[in-house]
Image (tube, rainbow, N blue to C red):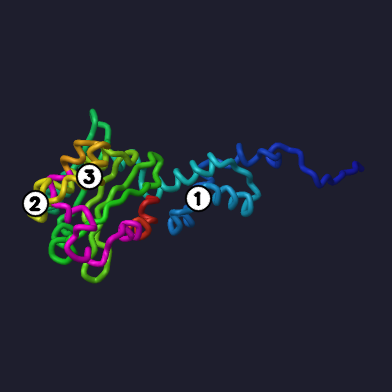
Amino acid sequence: MSTKNFKSTHICGQHGANAGNSRASRKFIASQIQVVLKVRPDLRAVNIKNDMLSNFVIKINYSKAWWGKETTQQDLFGDDDETYDSLRLYESMEHATNLGSRVVIDADDGRFRRLFISYNTCIEGFIAGCRPLLFLDGTFIKDRYRSILLSATGYDGNQGLFPLAYCVCDPENEVNWKWFLQGLWTLLCVLHLVKNYKKTMKDFGHKDDDMKELIAIDHRTYVTVMEYSPERWANAYFPGIRYSHVTSNVAESFNSWMRKARLL
């Protein structure tokens, strides 16, 4: 009768130190985290990596955890590429069914570059119930393209945040900010919410040291600034309280408010 010996240390392939890196597929990882990711879109790849080790004793690297999350997000919320491809259809449907909304897509030889969007409901609500203030800021969208969301947020009579316009673009830079602000300016001009006031250099006091410094830095900026009265852009000359707001805290609150949506 043969004798069998028990060995507590396993040396076969599936139990090796690197087994997790080769045995756990993206599909398997996605199936395990789908329920969690649906309620916790902020789940990070490092959390997935640790959970796979503690729950299944499977070691996976960071890259596989990240792609597992990407696969799950595509199953739950759709593919990023397909979503961008659908923007043209969304633009036409928005103009057809939501009159008064402003949706502008900027593309380069068919490749998406930027999106400006302001819904008619937001436009009318801003006119009817918000203070004439806009808070501008940019924040990351947590997608594979590392897009940026620029926003113009109002403040209503109930101390609530009131989004007016958005811009989805590539990295935050002067060109993209200018494009967004031009779209916002056009929107406001059409609504007759902005009037062009001008004063001469004599009215403001062109010998001011700060203005001399601005001229030295960029004369074009100085010329642009001088086209508008200083109470439009300088706290020191504003004839009253800026509706109790002199900081950009509202913009920061908006970014925090839509934090989970940024992850989608």
Q: Residue furthest bottom?
A: 158
Question: Pointer 2: what residue?
Answer: 197
Pick the quarter of the image with the N terminus: top right
Question: Pointer 3: what residue?
Answer: 211
Residue shown at 58%/42% (left/top)? Answer: 24
Quick one: SS at disc 3?
A: helix
Report if residue 16 lies within the magenta region. Answer: no
User: Residue 50: horizontal and vertical position, in percent?
Assistant: 60, 50
| Residue type, numbered disc 2 | Tyr
User: Residue 13: horizontal and vertical position, in percent?
Assistant: 70, 37
Q: Which of 185 and 19 is in front in this view?
A: 185
Residue shown at 45%/44% (left/top)? Answer: 70
Q: Badge 2: few (under 14), some or many (20 or more) residues near its Cα, within 10 Å?
A: few
Q: Point out the tag, 1 or 2, that comes first from the N-terminus.
A: 1
Q: Are marks 3 and 1 in contact (CB under 8 Å)?
A: no
Magenta segment, which residues? 225-253
Residue shown at 35%/56% (left/top)? Answer: 255
Q: Which of 133 and 114 is in front in this view?
A: 133
Quick one: SS at disc 1?
A: loop
| Residue type, numbered disc 3 | Met
Q: Point out the tag, 3 or 1, that comes first from the N-terminus.
A: 1
Which mark's residue is nearer the viewer, 1 or 2? Answer: 2
Q: Badge 3: few (under 14), some or many (20 or more) residues near its Cα, within 10 Å?
A: some
Q: Which mark is residue 44?
A: 1
| Residue type, numbered disc 1 | Arg
Q: Residue furthest front?
A: 207
User: Residue 79: horizontal and vertical position, in percent?
Assistant: 36, 42
Q: Quadrant of residue 88?
A: top left
Q: Point out the tag, 3 or 2, that comes first from the N-terminus.
A: 2
